[in-house]
Image (cartoon, grey):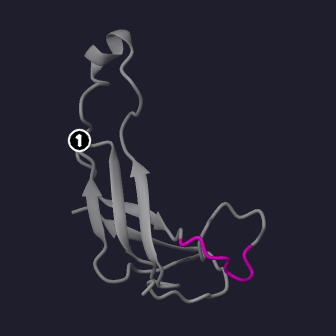
Amino acid sequence: MPPAHDLTPFREQELAPAGSPAIVRSADGRWYTVTGPCPNCHASSVFRVAYGLLGPHKGRRRFLGRGRTPDKLTGSILVYCQCGFPHPERPAESPDTGCGAFWDVPVP
C-alpha cells in the first residue's frame, strides 16, 4: 500500500518535523540523507544534502586538506518537501517538487 499523501494547496511554510526523521551520513562524510514524512502533506520524503568539498582530488590540494573527510555537521539540516505530487496552486516558476513545506531537522 503506498504511503499516505494529502494534496494540500502549495504554500511555502516552515513547520516542525513530523515524527522522528532519520539522518544518515555517508561513509565519506560528504552527504547527509534525511528520511521521514512531510509534516504538511504526509508524503514519505527523502532529502539529500551535500556537506564539505565534493569532487575528485586535484594535485597538491589533496595535501592541503581537501581529501580528508569533513568534520561532522552540527546544528540542523533545512529539509524541503520533495514529494513530487502536483499540488494545487503551485506556481509554475517554483523550483520545488513538493507542497512548499520546509523544516529543520537537528543533526544527532
* Quarter residue 66 falls in: top left
Q: Which residue is mark 1?
A: 71
* Quarter residue 74 falls in: bottom left
Q: Nearer the viewer, residue 29 or 12?
A: 29
Residue at far top of view: 60
Q: Position of residue 58 (x, y in %)?
A: 39, 15
Magenta-span inclusion, residue 76:
no
**Residue type at numbered disc 1:** Asp
Question: Where is 32 relative to 65, above or below?
Answer: below
Q: Position of residue 48 (x, y in %)?
A: 42, 56
Q: Position of residue 41 (x, y in %)?
A: 52, 84
Residue 35 relative to residue 45: left or right? left
Q: Nearer the viewer, residue 39 or 73?
A: 39
> Is residue 50 in view?
yes
Locate the C terminus and report the quarter of the image it occupies.
bottom left
Q: Position of residue 107 (x, y in %)?
A: 27, 61
Q: Magenta part of the protein: which range?
A: 83-90
At horizontal 34% and vertical 48% (from top left) the residue drawn is: 31
Question: Where is 49 relative to 53, above or below?
Answer: below
Residue 7 relative to residue 92: left or right? left
